[in-house]
Structures are given as structure tokens and as C-alpha cells.
Image (spheres, rainbow, N blue to C red):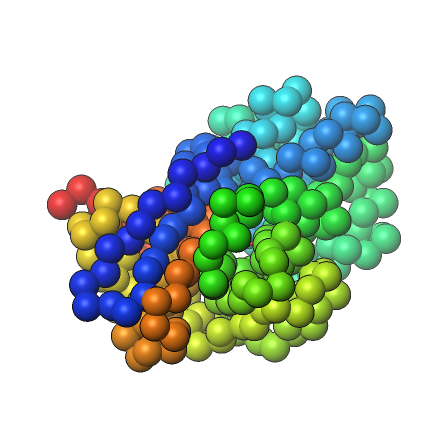
Amino acid sequence: MQVSTQEIVLSNASVKLFIKREDLIHPFVSGNKFRKLKYNLIEARNQNHKTLLTFGGAYSNHIAAVAFAGKENGFKTIGVVRGDELGSKISQNPTLKFCQDNGMEFVFVSREHYRLKNTEDFISCLKNDFGNFYLIPEGGTNDLAIRGCEEILTMEDKKYNYICCALGTGGTIAGIINSSSSQQQVLGFPSLKGDFIKEDIRKLAKNENWELISEYHFGGYGKVSSELIEFINDFYKKYFIPLDPIYTGKMVFGIIDLISKNYFPQNSKILLIHTGGIQGIKGMNLKLSNKNLKTINFND
Ligand SMILES: *Cc1c(COP(=O)(O)O)cnc(C)c1O
């Protein structure tokens, strides 16, 4: 799949910035979630599975992608969703509504119960209820997902000195690291707090030309500030590129900040990977407007 790369023209900068528009792959199966599912769907079909089962939070880009890609490829889909209070509120949640409209069946579980999702007991209970299924982990990260993400970078991307990517579970950046060349530096921007992620990536990635920049999580996973929301709105006004508040907005905020602090050597060529996530904006806006906070707006 050929994805377009565009330059982000900065004023007064001594570096060149580019963005790879993986978000344009599909409005709902966007960016890295498409890459992560590709070989898993092939494997599920090879194993003659009829059903995909996966896990996710209330606004998960991953379960939206599984619902849509599952339907397109003729699979039944089951989403195990974190939060037992959500079962009665599907129509008020744009992500879950989308999943349901695409045929996904849900199992809503309490937060405590959700933590047990990788245990044998939990899985065998689900098998009792639903029969056999192809299991895709939370966030979609497994070996086949990493293989799919190794296809994000192409030969033409060898010219960049830095490759930047937002991260959650680290599967996407592992694929990018694996297919980067050793002269390139891969920078990961975690969207959540915690050091465990570094260990995870060490296990998943084959090369060592990477580091994490952990100062731009804005308080943790799913947390935003009015500064971040304004940044996303301004960035759209300037460049007509939509960013999501959970992942790509934080990464691009971080990069622009690092550039202003002269983090990068002069004339560096920096490639940002736009991993998508745009479907999550509606849900974030609902949360923000419930608190009377400024929302993400790409219309004016
Ligand atoms: C899921 C997601 C990520 C994080 O991907 P991981 O492979 O879990 O690190 C980054 N950006 C977007 C838009 C996502 O939806």
C-alpha cells in the first residue's frame, strides 16, 4: 500500500519535517490498526476461524478497526469492553455505536474483571459462551501485527534521519524499528505514563536505534489539556492535517516543542508517522463538552 508523505513547512526552523499520512488508509480502519490487522486476518482465515474476539476501552481505535475489518472480511466479531456501566449506553458512545452498526457483539466487564482478560479462566469462559474464536490481544499487538507494521516504512523513507511515532503498546514502533536502517534514529512518544513500555519494546524490536521521549503524555492515557486541544485545532488551521488527542496530537506537540528547543541537529530530516485515530475525536469531544471544555474542531 502506497501512502502519501507531505512536508510540514515550518517557519524559522533549521530542520525539515514530513508526515506520512497513514491516517488516510481508511476512516475507521486507519493507520497502524490496519497494518496490525492485515496478517492477523489472513491467519484467522487460514485457521478456518469464523469469529474474531478482541478487547478494548470505551473509545478504542482498535475495536472500531476490528469491527469494520471483521465485517468486510466476513468474520463475526466480539468485543470485550472495559467498563460494565457502558452496556446501557452504547447509543451514546460513538465508537461502540459504530462497532455495533458493523455487527460487533459486546461483552461488558468491570474494570477488575477486565484485568484478568489474559488468564486461561477468562478465555475459557468466553469459549464456553461463544465457541471457538481467533483472539486478537488488546491494542492488536502480536508478532503478526509487528510484521504488518514493518511495512509502514519503504525504501523511499531511508532518506530521513529521524522517524517519529506515537505509542501505546509499542507494537507499531517495534515494526518501524525493525524496518528502519541503522543510521536512522526512531523516536517513540508514549501516550501513557510508565516505564514498563521500554521493556516491552526491547522484547519486541530487533534493533537498538531507538529511544523514548516520555515528556509528552499530558498526564497519562486518554488525558488531555486545553493547551493540547488548542494545539490540535491550530495545527489543523495551519496545515489542514487532523490529529487525534490520544496519540498523534501528543507526538506532534512534542516534536514541535523539541524543534523549538533545538533538539535536532541542523538540516535533520524528520519523518512523523500519522498513525490515524481520527475516529476517537467524537468520543473525546463528548467528554470535553460534558465538562464545558473546549472541543476539537476542524471546521473553523
Ligand atoms: C493504537 C494507536 C497507536 C499505538 O499503537 P501501538 O502499536 O499500540 O503502540 C498510535 N496511534 C494511534 C492513532 C493508535 O490508534
Direction from residue 164 to residue 227 in the image, left or right: left
Residue 210: image location, x then y, percent: 59, 69
Q: Residue at x 25, y 68 (%)?
A: 13
Q: Residue at x 40, y 61 (%)?
A: 269
> Who is closer to the viewer here, 156 or 153?
156
Count of all numbered marks drawn on residues in the image? 0
Q: Residue at x 49, y 27 (%)?
A: 101
Direction from residue 270 to residue 110 in the image, left or right: right
Q: Residue at x 61, y 68 (%)?
A: 209
Q: The C terminus lies in which quarter of the figure?
A: top left
With respect to residue 127, does 168 lie above or below?
below
With respect to residue 175, does 102 lie above or below?
above
Residue 152: image location, x then y, percent: 55, 45
Direction from residue 201 to residue 188 in the image, left or right: left
Residue 254, quarter of the rendered image: bottom left
For residue 119, say whether it is visible: yes
Residue 82: image location, x then y, percent: 59, 53
Residue 117, quarter of the rendered image: bottom right
With respect to residue 294, does 2 lie above or below?
above
Residue 289: image location, x then y, percent: 26, 54
For residue 290, say whether it is visible: no
> Who is closer to the viewer here, 265 or 144?
265
